[in-house]
Image (cartoon, rainbow, N blue to C red):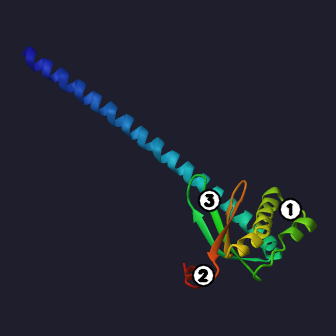
Amino acid sequence: MVLDKLRTKIDGKREAAGEASRDKMDAAKESASNLRMKVEEKLDESVEKLLIRLDEARPILDDAGYTIFDIRMTPHVPPKLGIVLMPKEPGVCRAAEVIERGTLTKPQRALLEGLVQIQRMHGTFTRNGYAVRGIEIDIGLPPSVCAHLVKIGGAEQSGSE
């Protein structure tokens, strides 16, 4: 009889502990779900801002003599947007002229200054047997600019990537 009462009491405690544990687990799942929704909202907002910045940069890049060849989106927190530019005319960069005549935002100016730096290195590339195949820009603060080089007369120049 005493043993039965003890077993009943233990079973009751187990059940109460299991219920409390389930409640805590449900609360944790709900918190995680809310956090995920907030992160997704922030990601969407950040992507939208990057796309707006890209659209604002298009006419400036066009004036500087470049066409957007490809756009790359990396959905990280924070997200990254990258573009690959191709010159409209080989060896022609009017980024310095656009900087001189326009009122630009700081990111736009930094982007164009990166293009000017690549253009300044054009002679060094050519002297060493390389040509710029394309220019990749990560739209961010600050934007980063890098040149994709190919060996002049090399096998990688004629083939696709």
Return the residue nearer the eye: 65 or 21. Answer: 65
Front residue of 20 and 113? 113
The N terminus lies in quadrant:
top left
Which residue is tagged 3?
A: 80
* In-image side of 1 versus 137 (left or right): left
Dot 2 corresponds to which residue?
A: 157
How far apart marks 3 and 1 lie (CA) works out to 22 Å
Numbered mark located on residue 147 in the image: none
Distance Cα–Cα, label 2 vs label 3: 28 Å
**Residue 132 horizontal/vertical position (percent):** 69, 75
- The image quarter containing residue 148 is bottom right
**Quadrant where the image shows the C terminus:** bottom right
Q: Position of residue 70 (x, y in %)?
A: 63, 74
Q: Is residue 129 above or below residue 29?
A: below
Find the residue positioned furthest to the front.
Answer: 127
- Viewer-nearest residue: 145 or 36: 145
Label of residue 104 in the image: 1
